[in-house]
């Protein structure tokens, strides 16, 4: 299962524009890290990775530096492939987008269906404080678990 970060657009109507970011290892980001970042409009990170990969390639020309160069290149590729989706999420949050939910689903179509059902469903209070205020402050509301709390902690 993949976890999908669901972002809603800033503004008055957040349900109009929704973006899904799959929080998983990205093979295109592993194979072409700099180009993947540039394609995803991560300009500074893409240029920095491009420069770092160039410096690693230039330094690994020396036969003694071949193994450290390969390991450093692998580390850069793994960093981008594992943390690339987080870069995208951080950019959306900086642009004013709101993280609405995190959905576990096998594929994007299922995540979209789950998100649509969550957007249509009314939001119920989930905390015990909200339950007490919805019940006009009565103690003894049913509790989830083995024991009744009767209003105490």
Image (tube, rainbow, N blue to C red):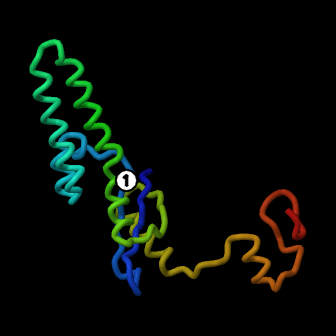
Image quadrant containing the C terminus: bottom right
Q: Position of residue 32 (x, y in %)?
A: 17, 43
Residue at position x 20%, y 56% in the image? 43
From the viewer's perspective, tell me whether residue 151 is left or right of residue 77. right
x, y (%) of residue 56? Answer: 17, 30
| Whether residue 10 is situated above or below residue 57 in the rendered picture | below
The percent position of residue 9, horizontal first and vertical second, equals: 37, 76
Number of callouts: 1
Quadrant of residue 115 in the image? bottom left
Residue underneath mark 1: 86
Which is more toward the observer, 130 or 2?
130
Taking depth in this image into account, of 46 and 1 the one nearest to the observer is: 46
Q: Is residue 66 left or right of residue 71?
A: left
Residue 42's place in the image compared with 57, above or below, is: below
Dot 1: element: helix
Residue 121 appears in the rendering: yes
* Residue 114 seen anywhere in this rendered image of the structure: no
């Amino acid at each position: 299962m993949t976890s999908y970060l669901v972002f809603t657009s800033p503004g008055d109507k957040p349900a109009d524009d929704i973006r899904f970011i799959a929080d998983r290892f990205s093979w295109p980001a592993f194979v072409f890290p700099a180009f993947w970042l540039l394609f995803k409009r991560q300009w500074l990170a893409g240029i920095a990775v491009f420069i770092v990969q160039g410096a690693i390639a230039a330094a690994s020309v020396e036969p003694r530096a071949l193994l450290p160069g390969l390991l450093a290149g692998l580390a850069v590729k793994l960093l981008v492939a594992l943390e690339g989706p987080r870069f995208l999420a951080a950019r959306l949050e900086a642009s004013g987008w709101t993280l609405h939910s995190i959905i576990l689903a096998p594929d994007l179509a299922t995540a979209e269906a789950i998100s649509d059902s969550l957007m249509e469903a009314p939001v119920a209070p989930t905390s015990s404080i909200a339950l007490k205020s919805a019940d006009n402050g009565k103690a003894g509301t049913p509790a989830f678990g083995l024991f009744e709390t009767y209003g105490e902690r």
